[in-house]
Image (spheres, rainbow, N blue to C red):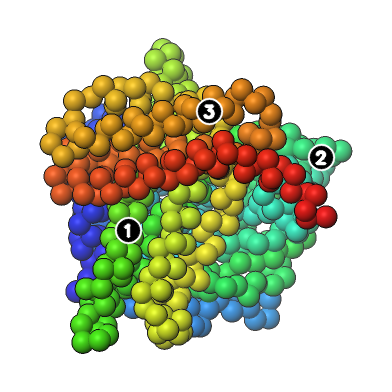
Amino acid sequence: MPNFFTDNSDLQFVFDNLDLKEIIEIAEDDFEQVKQYNYAPRDIEDAKENYYKVLEIVGDITGNFVAERAASVDEEGAKYKDGTVHYASGTVENLKQLAQADMMGMSFPRKYGGLNLPFTIYIMSIELISRADASLMNIFGLQDIADTIMKFGNEEQRQEFIPGFCKGEYTGAMALTEPDAGSDLQAVKLHAYQDEKGQWFLKGVKRFITNGNGDILLVLARSEAGTKDGRGLSMFVCYGKDNVKVRRIENKLGIHGSPTCELQFNDTPAQLIGQRKFGLIKYVFDLMYRARMGIAAQALGIAQEAYEEALKYAKEREQFGKSIYTIPVVANILIDMRVALEANRALLYAVAQTVDLKEKLEGKIVKLKEQGKPFGEENTRLKRLVKESNFLTPLAKYILTESANKITFDALQIHGGTGYMHEFKVERLVRDARITNIYEGTSQLQIVAATGAVINDLFAEYFEAKEKKDYKGGAAPLVNHLIEIREIYKDCLRYMVDKRDNAFQDVAAKDIVELYGYLYVGYLLLDQAEIEPEKVFIANRYILTSLAKARMNSESIKDGLFNDILHANKILT
Protein backbone atom coordinates (compact mmCIF):
# COMPACT_ATOMS: atom_id res chain seq x y z
CA MET A 1 0.00 0.00 0.00
CA PRO A 2 1.43 3.43 -0.94
CA ASN A 3 2.58 5.84 1.72
CA PHE A 4 3.37 9.25 0.25
CA PHE A 5 5.87 10.00 3.01
CA THR A 6 7.86 6.79 3.36
CA ASP A 7 7.76 6.09 -0.40
CA ASN A 8 9.52 9.37 -1.22
CA SER A 9 13.26 8.87 -0.71
CA ASP A 10 14.10 12.53 -1.26
CA LEU A 11 11.53 13.70 1.28
CA GLN A 12 12.94 11.13 3.71
CA PHE A 13 16.43 12.51 3.11
CA VAL A 14 15.28 16.07 3.73
CA PHE A 15 13.45 15.06 6.92
CA ASP A 16 16.48 13.18 8.25
CA ASN A 17 18.66 16.27 7.76
CA LEU A 18 16.34 18.98 9.07
CA ASP A 19 18.01 21.38 11.50
CA LEU A 20 15.19 21.76 14.02
CA LYS A 21 17.10 21.73 17.31
CA GLU A 22 16.55 25.36 18.31
CA ILE A 23 13.04 25.38 16.86
CA ILE A 24 12.10 22.34 18.95
CA GLU A 25 13.70 23.70 22.12
CA ILE A 26 11.73 26.96 21.89
CA ALA A 27 8.49 25.19 20.93
CA GLU A 28 8.80 22.78 23.86
CA ASP A 29 9.93 25.41 26.39
CA ASP A 30 13.22 23.53 26.75
CA PHE A 31 11.15 20.36 27.29
CA GLU A 32 9.29 21.76 30.28
CA GLN A 33 5.99 20.98 28.54
CA VAL A 34 6.37 17.28 29.28
CA LYS A 35 5.63 18.09 32.93
CA GLN A 36 2.14 19.22 31.93
CA TYR A 37 1.55 16.94 28.93
CA ASN A 38 2.97 13.44 29.41
CA TYR A 39 2.79 12.83 25.65
CA ALA A 40 5.06 15.81 24.88
CA PRO A 41 8.61 14.94 23.73
CA ARG A 42 11.38 14.64 26.30
CA ASP A 43 14.31 15.52 24.03
CA ILE A 44 15.24 16.34 20.42
CA GLU A 45 15.26 12.74 19.23
CA ASP A 46 11.92 12.03 20.88
CA ALA A 47 10.45 15.08 19.12
CA LYS A 48 11.72 14.01 15.71
CA GLU A 49 10.39 10.50 16.25
CA ASN A 50 6.98 12.02 16.99
CA TYR A 51 7.15 14.14 13.85
CA TYR A 52 8.08 11.10 11.79
CA LYS A 53 5.07 9.18 13.12
CA VAL A 54 2.76 12.08 12.31
CA LEU A 55 4.08 12.27 8.75
CA GLU A 56 3.72 8.50 8.41
CA ILE A 57 0.05 8.84 9.32
CA VAL A 58 -0.45 11.70 6.86
CA GLY A 59 1.45 9.72 4.23
CA ASP A 60 -0.81 6.73 4.74
CA ILE A 61 -4.03 8.74 4.62
CA THR A 62 -2.95 10.66 1.52
CA GLY A 63 -1.50 7.68 -0.34
CA ASN A 64 -4.26 5.19 0.35
CA PHE A 65 -7.40 7.25 0.75
CA VAL A 66 -7.18 10.88 -0.40
CA ALA A 67 -5.43 10.00 -3.67
CA GLU A 68 -8.02 7.32 -4.40
CA ARG A 69 -10.84 9.86 -4.05
CA ALA A 70 -9.15 12.67 -5.98
CA ALA A 71 -10.60 11.84 -9.40
CA SER A 72 -14.16 11.65 -8.07
CA VAL A 73 -13.66 14.89 -6.13
CA ASP A 74 -12.50 16.59 -9.32
CA GLU A 75 -15.45 15.17 -11.26
CA GLU A 76 -18.10 15.98 -8.66
CA GLY A 77 -16.57 19.26 -7.49
CA ALA A 78 -17.94 21.64 -4.90
CA LYS A 79 -21.57 22.56 -5.62
CA TYR A 80 -23.66 25.65 -4.90
CA LYS A 81 -27.34 25.04 -4.25
CA ASP A 82 -29.99 27.17 -2.56
CA GLY A 83 -27.40 29.60 -1.23
CA THR A 84 -25.28 26.86 0.34
CA VAL A 85 -21.94 25.37 -0.70
CA HIS A 86 -21.62 21.59 -0.59
CA TYR A 87 -18.24 19.84 -0.71
CA ALA A 88 -17.77 16.81 -2.94
CA SER A 89 -18.51 13.61 -0.99
CA GLY A 90 -14.84 12.59 -1.18
CA THR A 91 -13.77 15.91 0.34
CA VAL A 92 -16.15 15.37 3.25
CA GLU A 93 -14.64 11.93 3.88
CA ASN A 94 -11.09 13.30 3.61
CA LEU A 95 -11.73 16.03 6.17
CA LYS A 96 -13.40 13.56 8.50
CA GLN A 97 -10.46 11.18 8.26
CA LEU A 98 -7.90 13.90 8.93
CA ALA A 99 -9.91 15.17 11.90
CA GLN A 100 -10.20 11.68 13.36
CA ALA A 101 -6.42 11.38 13.08
CA ASP A 102 -6.05 14.72 14.96
CA MET A 103 -4.32 16.37 12.00
CA MET A 104 -6.40 19.54 11.76
CA GLY A 105 -4.50 21.55 14.38
CA MET A 106 -0.92 20.63 13.62
CA SER A 107 0.99 23.74 14.58
CA PHE A 108 -1.16 24.97 17.47
CA PRO A 109 -0.24 24.69 21.17
CA ARG A 110 -1.38 21.67 23.14
CA LYS A 111 -3.43 23.84 25.51
CA TYR A 112 -5.87 24.46 22.63
CA GLY A 113 -5.88 20.84 21.44
CA GLY A 114 -3.12 21.16 18.85
CA LEU A 115 -0.07 18.99 18.17
CA ASN A 116 2.47 21.81 18.68
CA LEU A 117 4.39 20.78 15.55
CA PRO A 118 6.97 23.02 13.87
CA PHE A 119 5.84 24.96 10.80
CA THR A 120 8.33 22.92 8.75
CA ILE A 121 6.52 19.65 9.55
CA TYR A 122 3.18 21.27 8.77
CA ILE A 123 4.56 22.28 5.34
CA MET A 124 5.66 18.69 4.73
CA SER A 125 2.09 17.60 5.44
CA ILE A 126 0.83 20.14 2.91
CA GLU A 127 3.16 18.70 0.28
CA LEU A 128 1.78 15.20 0.96
CA ILE A 129 -1.85 16.31 0.86
CA SER A 130 -1.30 18.33 -2.31
CA ARG A 131 0.28 15.37 -4.05
CA ALA A 132 -2.88 13.38 -3.33
CA ASP A 133 -5.45 16.11 -4.04
CA ALA A 134 -4.42 19.74 -4.48
CA SER A 135 -7.95 20.97 -3.81
CA LEU A 136 -7.96 19.42 -0.33
CA MET A 137 -4.91 21.46 0.58
CA ASN A 138 -6.97 24.62 0.02
CA ILE A 139 -9.19 23.58 2.92
CA PHE A 140 -6.63 21.82 5.14
CA GLY A 141 -4.04 24.59 4.61
CA LEU A 142 -6.37 27.30 5.87
CA GLN A 143 -5.39 26.38 9.41
CA ASP A 144 -3.24 29.45 8.88
CA ILE A 145 -6.10 31.82 9.64
CA ALA A 146 -6.19 30.35 13.14
CA ASP A 147 -2.46 31.08 13.36
CA THR A 148 -3.23 34.77 12.83
CA ILE A 149 -5.78 34.61 15.67
CA MET A 150 -3.20 32.78 17.77
CA LYS A 151 -0.52 35.44 17.22
CA PHE A 152 -2.51 38.66 17.23
CA GLY A 153 -5.84 37.91 18.90
CA ASN A 154 -6.51 38.05 22.62
CA GLU A 155 -6.75 35.00 24.88
CA GLU A 156 -10.54 35.06 24.81
CA GLN A 157 -10.48 34.87 21.01
CA ARG A 158 -7.94 32.05 21.08
CA GLN A 159 -10.14 30.06 23.43
CA GLU A 160 -13.19 30.73 21.29
CA PHE A 161 -11.81 29.78 17.87
CA ILE A 162 -8.65 27.66 17.98
CA PRO A 163 -9.94 24.49 19.71
CA GLY A 164 -12.63 24.20 17.03
CA PHE A 165 -9.98 24.22 14.31
CA CYS A 166 -7.92 21.61 16.14
CA LYS A 167 -10.94 19.29 16.47
CA GLY A 168 -11.84 19.69 12.81
CA GLU A 169 -15.12 21.38 13.73
CA TYR A 170 -14.20 24.56 11.85
CA THR A 171 -12.86 25.23 8.41
CA GLY A 172 -11.71 28.73 7.58
CA ALA A 173 -11.09 31.31 4.88
CA MET A 174 -9.04 34.44 4.34
CA ALA A 175 -11.42 37.05 2.95
CA LEU A 176 -8.99 39.55 1.50
CA THR A 177 -9.64 40.20 -2.20
CA GLU A 178 -12.49 42.17 -3.72
CA PRO A 179 -13.77 42.82 -7.26
CA ASP A 180 -11.57 45.94 -7.47
CA ALA A 181 -8.87 44.87 -5.03
CA GLY A 182 -6.97 41.76 -6.11
CA SER A 183 -3.22 41.98 -5.57
CA ASP A 184 -3.64 45.66 -4.63
CA LEU A 185 -5.06 45.11 -1.17
CA GLN A 186 -4.67 48.79 -0.31
CA ALA A 187 -7.78 49.29 -2.44
CA VAL A 188 -10.01 47.18 -0.16
CA LYS A 189 -13.39 48.88 0.37
CA LEU A 190 -15.39 46.45 2.53
CA HIS A 191 -16.61 48.63 5.39
CA ALA A 192 -16.16 47.94 9.09
CA TYR A 193 -18.12 50.06 11.53
CA GLN A 194 -19.10 50.08 15.20
CA ASP A 195 -22.44 50.60 16.89
CA GLU A 196 -22.93 52.68 20.03
CA LYS A 197 -21.91 49.68 22.19
CA GLY A 198 -18.61 49.24 20.35
CA GLN A 199 -19.68 46.08 18.47
CA TRP A 200 -18.05 45.81 15.05
CA PHE A 201 -20.00 44.99 11.87
CA LEU A 202 -18.90 44.28 8.29
CA LYS A 203 -20.65 45.39 5.13
CA GLY A 204 -19.55 44.82 1.53
CA VAL A 205 -18.39 42.20 -0.97
CA LYS A 206 -15.38 39.89 -1.22
CA ARG A 207 -14.50 37.91 -4.35
CA PHE A 208 -12.30 34.93 -5.27
CA ILE A 209 -12.29 33.71 -1.66
CA THR A 210 -10.83 30.22 -1.35
CA ASN A 211 -13.15 28.10 0.80
CA GLY A 212 -15.27 31.19 1.34
CA ASN A 213 -17.98 28.95 2.76
CA GLY A 214 -15.72 28.30 5.77
CA ASP A 215 -17.08 28.40 9.30
CA ILE A 216 -14.63 31.09 10.42
CA LEU A 217 -13.65 34.04 8.22
CA LEU A 218 -10.62 36.27 8.63
CA VAL A 219 -11.63 39.53 6.96
CA LEU A 220 -9.59 42.55 5.86
CA ALA A 221 -11.83 45.61 6.06
CA ARG A 222 -11.67 49.40 5.99
CA SER A 223 -12.21 50.54 9.56
CA GLU A 224 -11.08 54.14 9.20
CA ALA A 225 -13.60 56.29 7.37
CA GLY A 226 -12.19 58.57 4.69
CA THR A 227 -8.96 56.61 4.16
CA LYS A 228 -7.92 55.12 0.83
CA ASP A 229 -4.66 53.31 1.60
CA GLY A 230 -3.43 50.41 3.69
CA ARG A 231 -3.26 52.46 6.88
CA GLY A 232 -7.05 52.51 7.07
CA LEU A 233 -7.44 48.72 7.10
CA SER A 234 -7.96 46.43 10.08
CA MET A 235 -8.32 42.67 10.52
CA PHE A 236 -11.52 41.05 11.76
CA VAL A 237 -12.79 37.56 12.50
CA CYS A 238 -16.41 36.48 12.15
CA TYR A 239 -18.57 33.39 11.79
CA GLY A 240 -19.50 32.49 8.24
CA LYS A 241 -23.11 31.82 9.21
CA ASP A 242 -23.71 35.29 10.66
CA ASN A 243 -25.22 37.47 7.93
CA VAL A 244 -22.72 36.27 5.32
CA LYS A 245 -24.21 35.26 2.00
CA VAL A 246 -22.35 33.15 -0.55
CA ARG A 247 -23.53 34.80 -3.76
CA ARG A 248 -21.90 32.29 -6.08
CA ILE A 249 -18.97 29.91 -6.50
CA GLU A 250 -16.62 30.17 -9.45
CA ASN A 251 -16.51 27.64 -12.29
CA LYS A 252 -12.77 27.05 -12.39
CA LEU A 253 -10.21 25.37 -14.62
CA GLY A 254 -8.85 23.23 -11.78
CA ILE A 255 -8.87 22.41 -8.06
CA HIS A 256 -12.58 21.64 -8.38
CA GLY A 257 -12.89 20.27 -4.86
CA SER A 258 -12.07 23.68 -3.41
CA PRO A 259 -14.97 26.18 -3.63
CA THR A 260 -13.96 29.72 -4.61
CA CYS A 261 -16.70 32.05 -3.44
CA GLU A 262 -18.10 35.52 -3.81
CA LEU A 263 -19.29 36.71 -0.40
CA GLN A 264 -21.68 39.42 0.66
CA PHE A 265 -21.39 40.73 4.22
CA ASN A 266 -24.69 42.13 5.41
CA ASP A 267 -23.95 43.94 8.68
CA THR A 268 -22.06 40.86 9.87
CA PRO A 269 -21.04 40.99 13.56
CA ALA A 270 -17.26 40.67 13.86
CA GLN A 271 -14.38 40.92 16.31
CA LEU A 272 -11.32 43.10 15.81
CA ILE A 273 -8.06 41.14 15.71
CA GLY A 274 -5.16 43.00 17.28
CA GLN A 275 -4.96 46.75 16.76
CA ARG A 276 -6.88 48.98 14.41
CA LYS A 277 -5.05 50.11 11.23
CA PHE A 278 -2.62 47.16 11.36
CA GLY A 279 -4.69 44.81 9.20
CA LEU A 280 -2.61 45.12 6.04
CA ILE A 281 0.67 46.60 7.14
CA LYS A 282 1.28 43.96 9.82
CA TYR A 283 -1.20 41.08 9.96
CA VAL A 284 -1.61 40.36 6.24
CA PHE A 285 2.13 40.66 5.70
CA ASP A 286 2.71 38.13 8.48
CA LEU A 287 0.02 35.87 7.04
CA MET A 288 1.70 35.97 3.62
CA TYR A 289 4.79 34.14 4.91
CA ARG A 290 2.66 31.08 5.52
CA ALA A 291 0.40 31.61 2.51
CA ARG A 292 3.32 31.75 0.08
CA MET A 293 4.93 28.71 1.63
CA GLY A 294 1.67 26.78 1.57
CA ILE A 295 1.22 27.39 -2.17
CA ALA A 296 4.87 26.52 -2.84
CA ALA A 297 4.33 23.20 -1.01
CA GLN A 298 1.11 22.66 -2.93
CA ALA A 299 2.98 23.18 -6.20
CA LEU A 300 5.69 20.73 -5.14
CA GLY A 301 3.13 18.06 -4.23
CA ILE A 302 1.38 18.40 -7.59
CA ALA A 303 4.71 18.29 -9.43
CA GLN A 304 5.85 15.19 -7.52
CA GLU A 305 2.73 13.29 -8.52
CA ALA A 306 3.08 14.44 -12.14
CA TYR A 307 6.62 13.07 -12.19
CA GLU A 308 5.48 9.77 -10.67
CA GLU A 309 2.76 9.44 -13.30
CA ALA A 310 5.13 10.31 -16.15
CA LEU A 311 7.79 7.87 -14.94
CA LYS A 312 5.27 5.06 -14.59
CA TYR A 313 3.75 5.72 -18.00
CA ALA A 314 7.15 5.96 -19.71
CA LYS A 315 8.17 2.56 -18.33
CA GLU A 316 4.90 0.90 -19.33
CA ARG A 317 4.29 2.50 -22.74
CA GLU A 318 5.89 0.68 -25.65
CA GLN A 319 6.54 2.18 -29.08
CA PHE A 320 8.48 0.54 -31.90
CA GLY A 321 8.96 -2.54 -29.76
CA LYS A 322 10.49 -0.89 -26.70
CA SER A 323 9.54 1.22 -23.70
CA ILE A 324 9.58 4.95 -24.37
CA TYR A 325 11.55 5.20 -21.12
CA THR A 326 14.58 4.00 -23.11
CA ILE A 327 14.29 6.83 -25.66
CA PRO A 328 17.01 9.36 -24.71
CA VAL A 329 14.90 12.50 -25.28
CA VAL A 330 12.17 11.11 -23.02
CA ALA A 331 14.66 9.97 -20.37
CA ASN A 332 16.23 13.42 -20.46
CA ILE A 333 12.90 15.09 -19.69
CA LEU A 334 12.40 12.74 -16.75
CA ILE A 335 15.88 13.47 -15.42
CA ASP A 336 15.27 17.22 -15.63
CA MET A 337 11.99 16.76 -13.77
CA ARG A 338 13.71 14.80 -11.01
CA VAL A 339 16.50 17.36 -10.67
CA ALA A 340 13.98 20.20 -10.48
CA LEU A 341 11.95 18.37 -7.83
CA GLU A 342 14.94 17.74 -5.58
CA ALA A 343 16.25 21.30 -6.03
CA ASN A 344 12.82 22.70 -5.26
CA ARG A 345 12.43 20.52 -2.19
CA ALA A 346 15.82 21.63 -0.89
CA LEU A 347 14.73 25.24 -1.30
CA LEU A 348 11.26 24.79 0.21
CA TYR A 349 12.45 23.22 3.44
CA ALA A 350 15.42 25.53 3.87
CA VAL A 351 12.97 28.44 3.68
CA ALA A 352 10.45 26.66 5.92
CA GLN A 353 13.09 26.35 8.64
CA THR A 354 13.92 30.06 8.28
CA VAL A 355 10.25 31.04 8.70
CA ASP A 356 9.89 28.50 11.52
CA LEU A 357 12.78 29.98 13.49
CA LYS A 358 11.51 33.52 12.84
CA GLU A 359 8.12 32.61 14.31
CA LYS A 360 9.62 30.80 17.28
CA LEU A 361 11.91 33.72 18.10
CA GLU A 362 8.94 36.10 17.91
CA GLY A 363 7.17 33.97 20.50
CA LYS A 364 10.27 33.69 22.66
CA ILE A 365 10.75 37.48 22.67
CA VAL A 366 7.14 37.99 23.78
CA LYS A 367 7.74 35.65 26.74
CA LEU A 368 11.05 37.32 27.64
CA LYS A 369 9.34 40.71 27.65
CA GLU A 370 6.58 39.39 29.91
CA GLN A 371 9.21 38.00 32.28
CA GLY A 372 11.19 41.25 32.27
CA LYS A 373 14.26 39.50 30.87
CA PRO A 374 16.69 40.92 28.26
CA PHE A 375 16.00 39.97 24.64
CA GLY A 376 18.52 42.07 22.68
CA GLU A 377 20.36 39.11 21.18
CA GLU A 378 17.14 37.43 20.11
CA ASN A 379 15.84 40.69 18.64
CA THR A 380 18.98 41.17 16.55
CA ARG A 381 18.64 37.66 15.15
CA LEU A 382 14.95 38.18 14.52
CA LYS A 383 15.58 41.29 12.41
CA ARG A 384 17.92 39.27 10.20
CA LEU A 385 15.46 36.38 9.91
CA VAL A 386 12.66 38.77 8.93
CA LYS A 387 14.81 40.14 6.11
CA GLU A 388 15.66 36.62 4.96
CA SER A 389 12.03 35.49 5.13
CA ASN A 390 10.88 38.57 3.23
CA PHE A 391 13.15 37.49 0.38
CA LEU A 392 13.06 33.72 0.55
CA THR A 393 9.29 33.22 0.75
CA PRO A 394 8.53 35.02 -2.54
CA LEU A 395 11.59 33.37 -4.12
CA ALA A 396 10.33 29.92 -3.12
CA LYS A 397 6.81 30.60 -4.34
CA TYR A 398 8.11 31.94 -7.65
CA ILE A 399 10.52 29.08 -8.33
CA LEU A 400 8.32 26.20 -7.17
CA THR A 401 5.09 27.31 -8.82
CA GLU A 402 6.72 28.13 -12.15
CA SER A 403 8.53 24.79 -11.97
CA ALA A 404 5.29 22.91 -11.18
CA ASN A 405 3.70 24.28 -14.31
CA LYS A 406 6.64 23.09 -16.42
CA ILE A 407 6.85 19.67 -14.76
CA THR A 408 3.14 18.97 -15.21
CA PHE A 409 3.32 20.22 -18.81
CA ASP A 410 6.25 17.88 -19.52
CA ALA A 411 4.49 15.00 -17.76
CA LEU A 412 1.52 15.43 -20.09
CA GLN A 413 3.90 15.57 -23.06
CA ILE A 414 5.39 12.21 -22.07
CA HIS A 415 1.89 10.76 -22.01
CA GLY A 416 1.31 11.99 -25.54
CA GLY A 417 -2.28 12.14 -26.75
CA THR A 418 -3.55 9.98 -23.91
CA GLY A 419 -2.43 12.57 -21.38
CA TYR A 420 -4.83 15.05 -22.93
CA MET A 421 -7.73 12.78 -22.09
CA HIS A 422 -9.81 13.32 -18.99
CA GLU A 423 -9.40 9.70 -17.91
CA PHE A 424 -5.69 10.19 -17.18
CA LYS A 425 -4.58 11.75 -13.90
CA VAL A 426 -1.96 13.97 -15.52
CA GLU A 427 -4.67 16.05 -17.21
CA ARG A 428 -6.03 17.02 -13.78
CA LEU A 429 -2.56 17.75 -12.44
CA VAL A 430 -1.89 20.18 -15.30
CA ARG A 431 -5.12 22.02 -14.54
CA ASP A 432 -4.48 22.06 -10.79
CA ALA A 433 -0.92 23.35 -11.16
CA ARG A 434 -1.94 26.33 -13.26
CA ILE A 435 -3.39 28.33 -10.40
CA THR A 436 -0.31 28.05 -8.16
CA ASN A 437 1.65 30.82 -9.85
CA ILE A 438 -1.41 33.09 -9.80
CA TYR A 439 -3.07 33.04 -6.39
CA GLU A 440 -1.55 34.36 -3.17
CA GLY A 441 0.43 36.72 -5.41
CA THR A 442 1.32 36.13 -9.05
CA SER A 443 4.85 35.21 -10.07
CA GLN A 444 5.37 38.77 -11.23
CA LEU A 445 4.53 40.11 -7.77
CA GLN A 446 6.87 37.57 -6.17
CA ILE A 447 9.67 39.01 -8.31
CA VAL A 448 8.77 42.51 -7.13
CA ALA A 449 8.83 41.32 -3.50
CA ALA A 450 12.23 39.62 -3.90
CA THR A 451 14.06 42.29 -5.91
CA GLY A 452 15.12 44.60 -3.08
CA ALA A 453 17.08 41.92 -1.26
CA VAL A 454 18.80 40.89 -4.48
CA ILE A 455 19.81 44.47 -5.30
CA ASN A 456 21.22 44.77 -1.76
CA ASP A 457 22.97 41.36 -1.98
CA LEU A 458 21.32 40.10 1.21
CA PHE A 459 23.26 36.82 1.29
CA ALA A 460 26.69 38.28 0.39
CA GLU A 461 28.41 37.01 3.55
CA TYR A 462 26.72 33.63 3.23
CA PHE A 463 27.92 33.19 -0.37
CA GLU A 464 31.43 34.38 0.48
CA ALA A 465 31.67 31.83 3.27
CA LYS A 466 30.46 29.07 0.96
CA GLU A 467 33.04 30.01 -1.66
CA LYS A 468 35.81 29.56 0.92
CA LYS A 469 34.49 26.25 2.23
CA ASP A 470 36.58 23.17 1.55
CA TYR A 471 34.00 20.90 -0.09
CA LYS A 472 34.84 17.21 -0.30
CA GLY A 473 34.40 14.58 -3.00
CA GLY A 474 32.33 15.21 -6.08
CA ALA A 475 30.96 18.47 -4.70
CA ALA A 476 34.36 20.19 -4.71
CA PRO A 477 34.69 21.16 -8.40
CA LEU A 478 31.12 22.48 -8.54
CA VAL A 479 31.97 25.44 -6.31
CA ASN A 480 33.88 27.06 -9.17
CA HIS A 481 30.75 27.08 -11.32
CA LEU A 482 28.79 28.81 -8.55
CA ILE A 483 31.60 31.33 -8.15
CA GLU A 484 31.28 32.04 -11.87
CA ILE A 485 27.52 32.54 -11.52
CA ARG A 486 28.16 34.95 -8.66
CA GLU A 487 30.55 36.95 -10.83
CA ILE A 488 27.87 37.10 -13.52
CA TYR A 489 25.40 38.33 -10.90
CA LYS A 490 27.83 41.01 -9.64
CA ASP A 491 28.53 42.18 -13.17
CA CYS A 492 24.82 42.45 -13.96
CA LEU A 493 24.16 44.24 -10.68
CA ARG A 494 26.86 46.83 -11.43
CA TYR A 495 25.41 47.32 -14.89
CA MET A 496 21.92 47.90 -13.49
CA VAL A 497 23.08 50.24 -10.72
CA ASP A 498 25.30 52.28 -13.05
CA LYS A 499 22.38 52.93 -15.38
CA ARG A 500 20.53 54.70 -12.57
CA ASP A 501 17.27 53.92 -14.30
CA ASN A 502 14.46 52.64 -12.08
CA ALA A 503 12.36 51.63 -15.06
CA PHE A 504 15.19 49.50 -16.41
CA GLN A 505 15.75 47.96 -12.98
CA ASP A 506 12.09 46.98 -12.77
CA VAL A 507 12.18 45.29 -16.17
CA ALA A 508 15.46 43.48 -15.46
CA ALA A 509 14.27 42.30 -12.02
CA LYS A 510 13.20 38.82 -13.11
CA ASP A 511 16.62 37.96 -14.53
CA ILE A 512 18.61 39.28 -11.57
CA VAL A 513 16.34 37.49 -9.07
CA GLU A 514 16.74 34.24 -10.99
CA LEU A 515 20.53 34.65 -10.90
CA TYR A 516 20.41 34.98 -7.13
CA GLY A 517 18.13 31.97 -6.90
CA TYR A 518 20.61 29.79 -8.80
CA LEU A 519 23.24 30.64 -6.19
CA TYR A 520 21.10 30.02 -3.15
CA VAL A 521 19.71 26.71 -4.39
CA GLY A 522 23.08 25.65 -5.80
CA TYR A 523 24.76 25.88 -2.40
CA LEU A 524 21.87 24.02 -0.75
CA LEU A 525 22.44 21.17 -3.19
CA LEU A 526 26.21 21.23 -2.59
CA ASP A 527 25.58 20.81 1.12
CA GLN A 528 23.30 17.86 0.36
CA ALA A 529 25.95 16.33 -1.92
CA GLU A 530 28.46 16.38 0.92
CA ILE A 531 26.07 14.39 3.08
CA GLU A 532 24.92 11.95 0.41
CA PRO A 533 27.25 11.12 -2.55
CA GLU A 534 24.27 10.16 -4.74
CA LYS A 535 23.21 13.80 -4.56
CA VAL A 536 26.32 14.85 -6.50
CA PHE A 537 24.55 14.03 -9.77
CA ILE A 538 21.60 16.29 -8.84
CA ALA A 539 23.91 19.12 -7.77
CA ASN A 540 26.07 18.78 -10.87
CA ARG A 541 23.15 18.83 -13.30
CA TYR A 542 21.41 21.69 -11.52
CA ILE A 543 24.52 23.88 -11.25
CA LEU A 544 25.72 23.32 -14.83
CA THR A 545 22.23 24.04 -16.16
CA SER A 546 22.05 27.12 -13.94
CA LEU A 547 25.40 28.36 -15.29
CA ALA A 548 24.06 28.16 -18.84
CA LYS A 549 20.88 29.97 -17.76
CA ALA A 550 22.92 32.58 -15.88
CA ARG A 551 24.73 33.50 -19.08
CA MET A 552 21.37 33.91 -20.80
CA ASN A 553 20.09 36.05 -17.92
CA SER A 554 23.17 38.23 -18.28
CA GLU A 555 22.66 38.63 -22.01
CA SER A 556 19.03 39.58 -21.46
CA ILE A 557 20.06 42.31 -19.00
CA LYS A 558 23.00 43.69 -20.93
CA ASP A 559 22.40 43.18 -24.66
CA GLY A 560 19.80 45.90 -25.11
CA LEU A 561 16.79 43.58 -25.18
CA PHE A 562 15.14 45.50 -22.39
CA ASN A 563 15.43 48.76 -24.28
CA ASP A 564 12.83 47.32 -26.64
CA ILE A 565 10.62 46.32 -23.72
CA LEU A 566 10.89 49.77 -22.15
CA HIS A 567 9.54 51.23 -25.37
CA ALA A 568 6.94 48.52 -25.90
CA ASN A 569 4.07 50.96 -25.49
CA LYS A 570 4.91 52.37 -28.91
CA ILE A 571 4.33 48.93 -30.39
CA LEU A 572 1.28 48.04 -28.32
CA THR A 573 -0.65 51.25 -28.98
Nearer to us of marks 2 and 3 is 3
- Is residue 136 among the parts visible in the rendering? no
Label 2 sits on a secondary structure element that is loop
Nearer to us of marks 2 and 1 is 1
- Closer to the camera in the image, 289 or 263: 289
Check contact, mark 3 vs mark 1: CB within 8 A: no
The residue drawn where x is 35% and y is 25% is 462
Dot 2 or dot 1, earlier in sequence: 2
How far, Cα to Cα, is label 3 from label 1?
29 Å
| Residue extending furthest toward the front | 559
Q: Is residue 554 above or below residue 573?
A: above
Q: Is residue 459 above or below residue 336?
A: above
| Residue extending furthest toward the right | 226
The residue drawn where x is 41% and y is 23% is 460
Does residue 347 appear to the left or right of 236 in the view shown? left
- Closer to the camera in the image, 66 or 522: 522
The residue drawn where x is 62% and y is 39% is 560
Label 1 sits on a secondary structure element that is helix
As drawn, the label of residue 228 is 2
Crowd tier of the residue under label 3, counting other residues whose Cα lies within 10 Å: few below 14, some 14–19, many 20 or above: many
Dot 2 or dot 3, earlier in sequence: 2
Amino acid type, mark 2: Lys
Say which residue label 3 marks: 493
The residue drawn where x is 32% and y is 73% is 309
